[in-house]
Amino acid sequence: MGYMEEAKVYFITGVTSGIGREFAVQLIKAGNLVYGIGRRKSSLESLKKELEEAGDRFLFSVCDVRESEKVQESIKICLKKFNKIDVLIANAGYSSRASFENFSFHEYKEQINVNTLAPIDILYRCYDELVKSKGQFVTISSVLAYGALDTYSAYSMSKVALSYFCEGVRNDLKKVGIDMTVIVPGYVNSDIRLRDNLGNFTSKLDRKNISLLEMDTNKAVSKMIRGIQKRKKLLRVGLSTYFLIALISSFSSLINKVLFRRT
């Protein structure tokens, strides 16, 4: 029990795949305690098996971040097992892509619900525990929060809103002892593009125009964890991320014209 009390407790959303899964693996291997939530039971069970040696240091719940009551129940279980939450990583999210005429209002709402409102909701639900632990709120932004590209309007909108929320409440959280880290990962080699416009998994992978800029997930997450441990305010991961931000923020119109054939 003494070890449990000394180890850091990470509550992570979206651990079934990609960055979230890698967060869980690396943090557990480093001796931390992790409670993860995700939608796909089979993927969570697979992760539990992969981390079998960790025993009860890794626990999970099957939960969609849009289902507030289930999120609350997961937090209660985490606190019952681990007694605290030191770091909340609001990682769950997806990237939708379509032209306006091929995108529905419902799909816009779901993109905002998952990428923007769910992190805010779970922050509220973990707030008291993070105050107690003088903890940390970590969330994931995007290079597409720095400029809009054709067919990515919903995704860019969701990440811009999240980024501005974070900057707007950063000092409020700091006053009560909660640090905030906003991560801009660039293009990481994960399966975020293996989802349709409602966040469901599909077999079609969108790799257009990005393969040369992709970062390995393992290396990217290692850098993210180091930044989180240093409690950095803003963490841009990899040189390609700086390049993409500069390119998108300054030349989005040209990119749209060249890559998307905008007239």
Image (tube, rainbow, N blue to C red):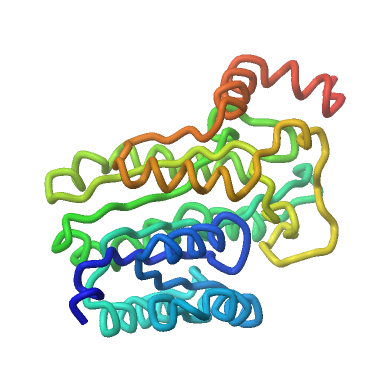
Q: Is residue 13 above or below residue 257?
A: below
Q: Position of residue 59 (x, y in %)?
A: 43, 79
Q: Residue at x 70, y 67 (%)?
A: 200
Q: Is residue 41 above or below residue 176?
A: below
In the picture, the quarter occupied by the N terminus is bottom left
Residue 6 position by quadrant: bottom left
Q: Residue at x 48, y 64 (%)?
A: 24
Residue 153 position by quadrant: top right
**Count of marks overlaid on the render:** 0
Q: Position of residue 47 (x, y in %)?
A: 58, 74
Q: Position of residue 96 (x, y in %)?
A: 69, 51
In the picture, the quarter occupied by the C terminus is top right
Q: Position of residue 235 (x, y in %)?
A: 42, 35
Q: Is residue 87 above or below residue 79?
A: above
Nearer to me, 175 or 158: 175
Q: In the shown orientation, is residue 100 left or right of residue 122?
A: right
Nearer to me, 153 or 18: 18
Q: Residue at x 71, y 18 (%)?
A: 253
Q: Residue at x 28, y 63 (%)?
A: 8
Q: In the shown orientation, is residue 262 left or right of residue 108?
A: right
Q: Is residue 12 above or below residue 63?
A: above
Q: In the shown orientation, is residue 86 left or right of residue 122?
A: left
